[in-house]
Image (spheres, rainbow, N blue to C red):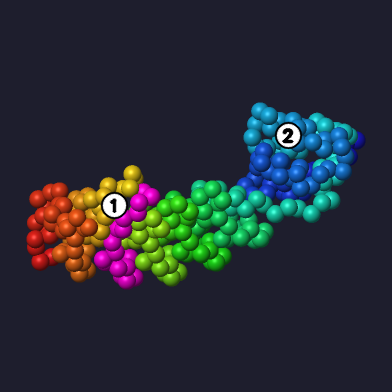
């Protein structure tokens, strides 16, 4: 008779399914094998472990496939051999970022409940779970992370963007509203050029987002600053531009109208002395700028 029960196998599967998404993936086998060395040396190496479950050909295993592998192994292997008696390990923190990025709220909730830090950031770029969920418009996951105490104004590495700016430029209205209602600062600036969320929204013509930002006291006269580190990425003509000027640059006529109604300064200039009217691309935009709004 095999030395395992279905209940044992299911319990072990739950332990090894570190991100709680219903499948055991290769990285989870590797992490489990590294932290919970099996009592038996028969399947004690990562190579044998992954070979047993067919991970050379497949990158994830369901609970049914998991149980079938144990049945095939018979008396050669039991859940106890695999380390069932060991304390379950905490999911790798970067898995929280992966699940937040795709809006897998159940997995995010499970990992937070298991003690993963809501403010963990990816070493490579400084992205947080809230930044990724906001970028992709996953409002339920954004709500979960806000409730868990995620830093609303965290800036990524490098160009230094916050969750609100990314949600704004992509037009995720409900996410923007949630972040603002949770007291995200509408005037948090990008690290490398000091663009605000309103500047980004004006550039992209995201009118509903702009209305929300203005309602929450976003500064109308935010200015893009010169940064020698990014001169190859940014055309110098934009230096000193305000949300109104950048909206005019990109012919966002309705955004220009909205900013003028809010009281934006039409006489503001770039570092090269250009006003919004000077850089207007279309007759409609020029007419709007010459009007009294």
Task: Tell me the residue at 71%/35% (across/down).
Answer: 65
Q: Residue 145 appears at what percent x and percent y?
A: 53, 61
Split into 4 quadrants, where in the image is the N terminus?
top right
Mark 2 or 1, nearer chain start: 2
Q: Residue 117 appears at what percent x and percent y?
A: 61, 60
The numbered disc on residue 50 is 2
Residue receiving disc 1:
204
Q: Residue 183 appears at what percent x and percent y?
A: 43, 70
Task: Tell me the residue at 73%/38% (across/down).
Answer: 66
Horizontally, is 189 left or right of 262 in the view? right
Question: Gap between marks 2 and 1, in whole Å?
Answer: 47 Å
Task: Looking at the picture, tell me which residue is in the foreground, 87 or 110.
Answer: 87
Question: Is any part of residue 68 visible from this angle?
Answer: no
Q: Which residues are magenta?
A: 203-230
10 Å crowding of disc 1: few (<14), some (14-19), many (20+): some
Task: Looking at the picture, tell me which residue is in the foreground, 25 or 94.
Answer: 94
The kind of secondary structure element at disc 2 is helix
228 part of magenta stretch:
yes
10 Å crowding of disc 2: few (<14), some (14-19), many (20+): some
Task: Tell me the residue at 9%/63% (across/down).
Answer: 291
Is 169 drawn above or below residue 52 in the view shown? below
Horizontally, is 105 left or right of 115 in the view? left
Question: Is any part of residue 283 visible from this angle?
Answer: yes
């Amino acid at each position: 008779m095999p030395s395992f029960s279905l209940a044992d196998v299911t319990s072990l599967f739950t332990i090894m399914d570190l991100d709680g998404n219903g499948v055991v993936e290769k990285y989870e086998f590797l992490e489990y094998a590294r932290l919970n060395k099996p009592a038996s040396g028969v399947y004690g190496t990562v190579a044998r472990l992954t070979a047993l479950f067919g991970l050379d050909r497949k990158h994830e295993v369901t609970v049914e496939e998991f149980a079938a592998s144990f049945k095939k192994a018979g008396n050669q292997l039991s859940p106890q051999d695999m380390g069932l008696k060991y304390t379950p390990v905490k999911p790798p923190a970067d898995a929280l970022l992966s699940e937040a990025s795709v809006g897998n709220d159940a997995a995010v909730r499970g990992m937070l409940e298991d003690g993963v830090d809501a403010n963990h950031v990816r070493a490579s770029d400084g992205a947080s779970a809230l930044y990724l969920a906001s970028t992709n418009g996953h409002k339920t996951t954004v709500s979960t992370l806000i409730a868990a105490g995620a830093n609303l104004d965290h800036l990524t590495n490098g160009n230094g963007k916050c969750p609100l700016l990314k949600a704004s430029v992509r037009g995720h209205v409900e996410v923007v509203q949630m972040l603002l209602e949770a007291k995200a600062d509408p005037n948090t600036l990008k690290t490398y050029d000091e663009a605000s969320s309103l500047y980004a929204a004006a550039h992209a013509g995201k009118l509903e987002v702009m209305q929300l930002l203005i309602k929450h006291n976003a500064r109308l006269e935010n200015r893009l600053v010169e940064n020698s580190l990014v001169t190859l990425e940014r055309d110098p003509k934009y230096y000193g531009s305000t949300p109104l000027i950048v909206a005019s640059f990109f012919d966002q006529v309705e955004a220009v109208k909205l900013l003028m109604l809010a009281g934006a300064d039409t006489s503001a200039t770039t570092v090269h002395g250009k006003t919004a009217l000077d850089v207007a691309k279309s007759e409609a935009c020029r007419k709007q700028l010459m009007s009294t709004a």
